[in-house]
Amino acid sequence: MEPSLPFRTCCRTRSPSRAWAIVGAILTLGVPASSCAQQSGWRLDLSEPLTYFISEGSPESGFQDTDRALAESALQSWGRQLDPPVVFAPGPEASATLRVYWVSAADGLYGEMRARRIGRRLGADVFVRPDINGLGPDIEYRGTVDTLFRDTVIYLTCVHELGHAFGLSHTRAFEDIMYSFQYGGDFGAYFMRFRDQLTDWDDIQQASPFSDGDRERFRSLYARPSTEH
């Protein structure tokens, strides 16, 4: 069963004085029915190379030159969880299956996934805020003194949002990339467990953001039918 469109997961912070809401917002999308992507039949067609488009961002949004590479690495990280890996190919903006856009703080969003249809295919637009200012003093400070921490936050946000684009829903398990901070937790520790795997920027492409649970759900969703009799 295909989900009816529009289909979206989003996050807006309305109470900036609450630190857990501000920081958690970066990975906490709404909990309406739309967030239950895996249960509603959402599944991208991987029978052909999956096309993607990653936009340029504006300096006003906090976008940095390396952010496009972070988004592409996030895509590839999901693709490597399948055997054989998902094949990705850059595509035109109008027809790409997955599109990533950068939003400014003025938009009030920390992350959003919106479903779309390209002909008969399902696709998704992902929106990511590349500015960590306003996410709480601890996150802001770490991102200011440690650029790899800042990149960790943006990268994990891309991975999480693309997880929704692939059809995964939130979980309650703190070790999952699809964990929702509506359930609480140590937000700094959440990001630092990935940051601690990095010595330099290139390590982002090699370090894994996934738990065993993330991998199992993703592989189950995209399991190939057996050819054995």
Image: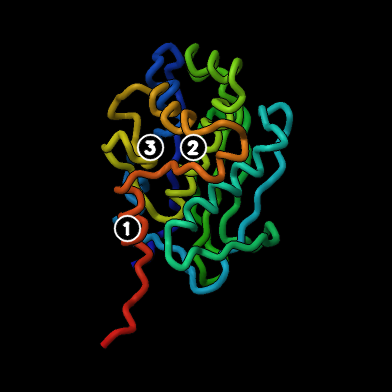
**Mark 3 belongs to which amino acid?**
Gly
- Horizontally, residue 81 falls left or right of residue 97, namely left
Q: Which residue is mark 3?
A: 30
Label whose residue precedes the other's in the sequence (1 or 3): 3
Report if the CB atoms under discs 1 and 2 are less than 8 Å apart: no
221 to 162, vertically: above or below? below
Q: Determine crowd level at label 2: few under 14, some 14-19, many 20+ residues with C-alpha closer than 10 A.
A: many
111 to 74, vertically: above or below? above
Q: Residue furthest front?
A: 199
Q: Quadrant of the C terminus?
A: bottom left
In whole angstroms, how far apart are the C-alphas of marks 1 and 2?
24 Å
Residue at 60 percent across and 52 percent down: it is 99
Q: Which mark is residue 147?
A: none
In whole angstroms, how far apart are the C-alphas of marks 3 and 2?
17 Å
Q: What secondary structure is marked by label 1? A: helix
The part of the image, by quadrant, that contains residue 134 is: top right
- Horizontally, residue 53 falls left or right of residue 163, namely right
The part of the image, by quadrant, that contains residue 63 is: top right
79 to 180, vertically: above or below? below
Q: Which residue is mark 1?
A: 40
The part of the image, by quadrant, that contains residue 146 is: top right
